Amino acid sequence: MSENIRVKVIAAISALIALSGNAYAQQHLDVQTTVQKQIVVENEDGSTETQLVPAGNVVPGETVVYTITFENVGDEAADNVVITNPISDVLTYVPGSASNSSMRVEFSADGGQTFGLASELTIVNEGIERPATTSDYTHVRWVMQTELEVGGKGTASFAAVLE
């Protein structure tokens, strides 16, 4: 890897870790984000398995996994909980990777101005409208469908590939 590319990758990783603190929510939630990368490990029997390790060194083509944990630290149940995480422009969202079975998952392809289901997103380029692709996504957000009781906790995650 040339030194110039190495510097760009290190800068991109620094941006990933900085962005991981930008997941945000509302209503007295404590939100923490962990960034890990996927690696494939070969077992003694020759089989392979995917593991998550700290994302200290990530190179183009590797998959990064964001895990967002949250807890209601307020004095009352939280309703209309929404957690939003930006997707860096050096990352491409992995289709179907946003998870949390009790929350509605939405995406933005316009810098977080509007959100919708993946099937609803469109892009207008030079007057031509087309369906948004995962490389167009700028944010992912989770919308809780029920109240989060005091002390209630949850987890949401998504994966993206470093370009």
Image (cartoon, rainbow, N blue to C red):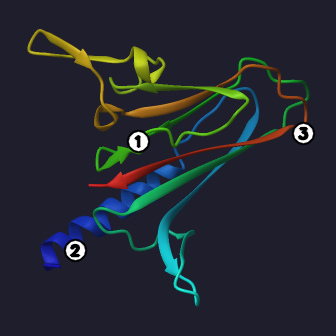
Q: In the rendering, which numbered label is found on residue 6?
A: 2
At x 49%, y 65%, the residue is 38
- Residue 110, image x and y in percent? 32, 23
- Residue 65, image x and y in percent? 51, 55
Cα gap from disc 2 to disc 3, whole angstroms: 43 Å
> Which residue was labeled with disc 3?
151
Identity of the residue furthest to the bottom in this view: 44
Question: Badge 3, how many Cα within 10 Å: few under 14, some, many 20+?
Answer: some
> Which residue was labeled with disc 1?
87
- Residue 159, image x and y in percent? 48, 49
At x 42%, y 19%, the residue is 119
> From the viewer's perspective, is the residue at label 1 or at label 3 nearer?
1
For label 1, the SS is loop
Cα gap from disc 1 to disc 3, whole angstroms: 28 Å
Cα gap from disc 1 to disc 2, whole angstroms: 21 Å
At x 83%, y 28%, the residue is 148
